[in-house]
Image (cartoon, rainbow, N blue to C red):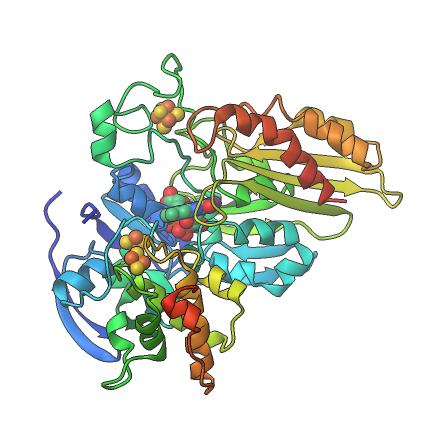
């Protein structure tokens, strides 16, 4: 059996208490929500916290609440299954609801939470392996080693952003509410993430993600399109999140396109976005915006499927995601 | 770090109380199999990738390899051992056996637990709904068709219909 390493388990009753416990134990501590990312990682000894702080008893984290200004606040501990079936999410935020329904398997979605999905560890062919496997080729710099097996000359890790919700949530410019011992703060979209396979988050380790806050509906449409080998189980090896704002005449006023599964963060397809603004979303424009997304899709050979092909299909996936925003 | 101490807790498994001592970092799968002797729940990948360890907690199918046993205390845990109705098989088990929807049988406990939860919510699922429900349970033997068919027949029987597998399902096409 693959077993968890021993650890002390905590179940604090408030987010502030959870943050304080994490701070007290520093690098030895990690939060757990559904455990579907953390526990496999612990079994493979990628992450070996000796203090695991569960957020299951923190009240309020399972609530979905309409805010007075029209935004929708989703508690970090809401399960993916709850969200994929949530009528308001399906009606008002179909792009995000679709991304969530594409995650893993029904059994894992019963356990996994939206908070855990937004903070999912980055992935790599040379990292998501057993301890023995990694030891046999020698460890890489993401855990226990000094070299990057994907880009041996590289000073950094290129592990891949693999959450299905992140690209569309960033494209929508949704906000994240974070609680620490110092209080509560909010960061928006891309600002939570950074382009590094190891330090892929900007938040402090002891900060608890309490809520995902979705923007008010109206004037924009978002979509998500995922590429993977099997229609179940598999992580995205390309995940396009798109969000397009239009005026009353159908002219694009703003567009965000994020490429997941292509680098260590959800990469903005800036050239494609620029092409769209000020124009009607015609088929020709969508195709051109797709083509312009080839360049930022700088895939590396550290996920499933052929690296060149993944890059080649990025324009197609971007165009399809944009067409879904029409 | 010093080895942690065992904890003593009472679980409700298939409606019966089980008092067991176990280390607090053990998964429900480990405690079911190794402390309670309930080996009906199988272990495969232990990483969430196969579904054979599926059990129900408060009616929801989950992967026991990724649930801490301590988190299942105070909840209603159901395993394949609890499926039989008295001395008789559950309709799902009955059809799985008749149809050869269990071949090596290794995936079967997990498939049964997931299918049982589906039929509780939906007494006449479509083929597509059955496929979706079982999308987290890998089977290396059957090719899935017999499994889907077995769930359909069991659902029909549970609705009181006299559903039988087709000749072709049992003997193959002539
Ligand atoms: C076989 C398999 C297939 C999968 N396929 C996919 C897939 O296709 N797409 C996909 O996106 N994911 C996939 N996953 C990953 C995972 O199941 C999901 O991302 C899930 O949503 C993670 O949520 P969780 O609650 O289980 O996270 P956990 O494992 O509990 O936590 C994940 C990380 O976030 C941190 N964390 C969690 N909640 C908080 C919080 N509120 N505040 C601060 N930190 C927190 C934890 O410390 C940990 O580092 C798969 C996993 C498996 C095992
Ligand atoms: S990208 Fe390089 S350093 Fe990062 S996990 Fe993969 S092999 Fe390791
Ligand atoms: S043993 Fe739990 S999913 Fe494979
Ligand atoms: S019957 Fe052998 S794995 Fe399913």
**Drawn side of residue B96 relative to residue A222, left or right:** left
**Relative to the observer, which residue lies in front, A240 or A145?**
A240
Which residue ends up furthest to the right in the rendered image? A249
Q: Is residue A60 above or below residue A33?
A: below
**Relative to the observer, which residue lies in front, A26 or A38?**
A38
Q: Where residue B100 sits: x, y (%)?
A: 32, 66
Q: Is residue B166 above or below residue A322?
A: below
Residue A209 visible to the viewer? no
Residue A152 visible to the viewer? yes
Task: Report which quarter residue B80 is drawn in.
Answer: bottom left
**Drawn side of residue A205 relative to residue A230, left or right:** left
Q: How many marks?
A: 0
* The N terminus of chain B sits in image quarter: top left
Q: Is residue A131 above or below residue A64?
A: above
Q: Where residue B157 sits: x, y (%)?
A: 43, 82
Residue drawn at (83%, 31%) of the image: A278
**Relative to the observer, which residue lies in front, B17 or B36?**
B36
**Relative to the observer, which residue lies in front, A307 or A206?**
A307
Residue drawn at (40%, 38%) of the image: A121
* The C terminus of chain B sits in image quarter: bottom left
Residue drawn at (34%, 56%) of the image: B51
Residue drawn at (33%, 42%) of the image: A23
Q: Where residue A30 sits: x, y (%)?
A: 32, 44
Task: Report which quarter residue A322 is drawn in.
Answer: top right
Q: Where residue B142 sits: x, y (%)?
A: 35, 58
Which residue ends up furthest to the front in the rendered image? B174
């Amino acid at each position: 059996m693959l077993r968890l390493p021993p650890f002390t388990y905590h179940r604090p009753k408030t987010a502030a208490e959870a943050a304080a416990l994490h701070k007290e134990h520093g690098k030895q501590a990690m939060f757990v929500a559904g455990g579907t990312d953390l526990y496999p990682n612990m079994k493979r000894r990628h992450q070996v916290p000796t203090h695991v702080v569960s957020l299951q008893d923190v009240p309020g984290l399972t609530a979905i609440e309409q805010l007075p200004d029209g935004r929708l606040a989703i508690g970090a501990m809401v399960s993916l299954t709850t969200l994929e079936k949530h009528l308001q999410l399906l009606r008002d935020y179909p792009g995000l609801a679709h991304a969530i329904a594409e995650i893993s398997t029904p059994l894992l979605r019963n356990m996994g939470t939206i908070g855990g999905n937004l903070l999912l560890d980055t992935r790599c062919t040379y990292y998501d392996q057993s301890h023995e496997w990694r030891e046999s080729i020698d460890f890489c710099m993401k855990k226990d080693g000094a070299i990057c097996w994907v880009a041996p000359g590289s000073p950094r890790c290129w592990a891949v952003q693999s959450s299905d919700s992140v690209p569309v949530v960033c494209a929508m410019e949704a906000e994240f509410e974070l609680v620490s011992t110092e209080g509560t703060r909010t960061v928006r979209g891309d600002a939570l993430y950074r382009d590094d396979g190891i330090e892929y988050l900007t938040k402090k380790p002891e900060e608890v993600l309490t809520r995902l806050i979705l923007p008010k509906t109206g004037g924009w449409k978002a979509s998500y399109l995922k590429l993977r080998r099997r229609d179940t189980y598999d992580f995205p090896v390309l995940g396009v999140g798109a969000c397009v704002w239009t005026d009353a005449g159908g002219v694009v006023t703003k567009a965000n396109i994020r490429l997941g599964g292509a680098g260590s963060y959800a990469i903005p397809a800036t050239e494609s976005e620029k092409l769209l603004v000020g124009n009607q979303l015609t088929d020709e424009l969508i195709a051109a915006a797709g083509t312009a997304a080839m360049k930022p899709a700088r895939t590396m050979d550290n996920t499933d499927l052929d690296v060149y092909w993944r890059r080649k299909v990025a324009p197609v996936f971007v165009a399809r995601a944009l067409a879904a925003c029409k | 770090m010093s080895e942690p101490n065992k904890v003593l807790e009472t679980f409700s498994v298939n409606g019966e109380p089980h008092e067991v001592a176990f280390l607090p970092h053990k998964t429900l799968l480990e405690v079911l199999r190794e402390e309670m002797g309930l080996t009906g729940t199988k272990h495969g990948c232990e990483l969430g990738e196969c579904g054979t360890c599926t059990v129900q907690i408060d009616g929801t199918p989950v992967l026991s390899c990724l649930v801490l046993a301590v988190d299942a205390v105070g909840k209603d845990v159901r395993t394949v051992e609890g499926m039989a109705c008295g001395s008789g098989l559950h309709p799902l088990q009955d059809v799985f056996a008749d149809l050869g929807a269990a071949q090596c049988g290794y995936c079967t406990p997990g498939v049964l637990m997931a299918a049982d939860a589906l039929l509780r919510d939906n007494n006449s699922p479509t083929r597509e709904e059955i496929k979706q429900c079982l999308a987290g349970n890998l089977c290396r033997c059957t090719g899935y068709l017999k499994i889907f068919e077995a769930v359909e027949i069991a659902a029909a029987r549970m609705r009181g219909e006299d559903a039988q597998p087709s000749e072709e399902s049992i003997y193959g096409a002539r």
